[in-house]
Amino acid sequence: LFIATASNFQESDLQQEIGSITSSSNYYLLRCHYDKKQKQLIFGYHTGKVAGISADEAMDLDQESHKEQFKIFHKLHVISMLEDDWRLNTCVILKNIARIINCLKDYAVPLIWTDSPKLSLVRNRSTINAHESVYCIQKVYDSEQICSVTNSTVTNMIQIYQAIEKAKVPHTDRLVSVVTQENVNGKTRICKFAPIGRAYLPLNLEELLDALVCVCEALVVMHAIGIMHRDIRWANVFHAFLSDNKATTTTTATTSGVSDQETFSREWFLFDFEFAAIAPQPAFAAHTLTPGNHAPEMVNKDDEIHSEHHDMAVDIWGLGYMIEHAEVDIPVSHFADLQKLQIATLQDDPNCRPSALHCLEVLRALQLRPTSTEKDVQKID
């Protein structure tokens, strides 16, 4: 969050301006304040986080303690408006802040995790193995139907997770527990999923290939048992934390998300199987899916290419969609083959797309290939 305040701003109005975030340690408020008397622009921040205490100790603090802490304005940089170039210096700082926030957005824990009863980050009380994640994602479903457009249901999702666990599908999240509660409208089901990680675009070629290989390895097993994910994109793939270090595993998450002690593994997980189904499935009516985000055969267009059904080939299209939207500089040594794979996987005709096994073989070969110099980079369009 960011706020700019004028010289007549009353510090007592801070809580009113930004609402309830002052009672939590989950937020940082960046601030630029104009001090008219001193002719200065002051950059700094507010936070409810108390320095020098552990995450568990912070959980025991009451709201008033966080509010008192939030009142403190931590100054980071001061620009004198008496200098000739103060406007330029201010623009440089604001530009850098914008660039930092833009980078952090892919790492940030969504606010919905702390503000919504439907989706939250909770402790995994059922953990027995010390190497398992002590945190998991909790989703609350108040009705059987998840999505009317896709006819997705909670029962189907649970069955899909049971099937992929039985088949030992690699690199997929798992359904840790399901608790059913009765309510006035029927049943409420509380589902917990693990492990946790961070969903973000890969930062370099190594991360891109690691992610694509992990997704392909999952698809090879899934497709062998007739299951298709149907919503493969970067938003549904996360980078897993290193799980073979007990100290790291037990300190990677707090009530606000994940701490600064996390370490990533080379494993990426495919998650969110709410949309998954057994192949084949009937195509959806036109205008029910976001154009360009899903394989074309998933929408019934009544032409020669688009049939009335779709199968596992939609996941291959999703793999190409991931390559297309990776936004990674690709070295010349890998560019041509990755572009060729992207073109093949994004074919309109599902029968012309390669199998998950073929994609996996191509990607594994690219992992072993030496990388050209950083100067020779291109972006796949």
Image (cartoon, grey):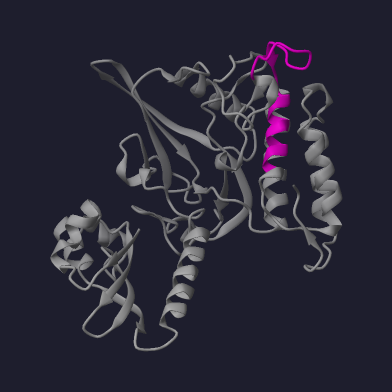
Q: Is residue 177 left or right of residue 237?
A: left
- Residue at image x 84%, y 42%? 340
Is residue 127 in sight in this rendering?
no
User: Is residue 319 one of those drawn in magenta?
Assistant: yes
Query: 168 and 349: which one is in front?
Result: 349
Total number of numbered discs in the rendering: 0
Which quarter of the figure has residue 363? Answer: top right
When the figure is inspected, residue 361 is found, relative to residue 95, above or below; the finding is above
Tell me which segment is drawn in magenta: 299-322
> For the view shown, which residue lies furthest in the bottom direction?
83
Is residue 152 in sight in this rendering?
yes
Q: Where is residue 8 drawn, in percent x and y?
A: 17, 71
When the figure is inspected, residue 256 is found, relative to residue 45, above or below; the finding is above
Q: Is residue 184 left or right of residue 339?
A: left
When the figure is inspected, residue 80 is found, relative to residue 29, above or below; the finding is below
- Residue at image x 68%, y 38%? 321
- Residue at image x 85%, y 47%? 337
User: Is residue 154 one of those drawn in magenta?
Assistant: no
Q: Where is residue 73 drawn, in percent x and y?
A: 25, 73
Q: Where is residue 164 drawn, in percent x and y?
A: 60, 28
When the figure is inspected, residue 363 is found, relative to residue 144, above or below; the finding is below
Query: 158 and 82: which one is in front?
Result: 82
Q: Is residue 47 left or right of residue 319?
A: left
- Residue at image x 47%, y 51%? 130
Q: Where is residue 374 drawn, in percent x and y?
A: 77, 67
Quadrant of the drawing holding the N terminus: bottom left
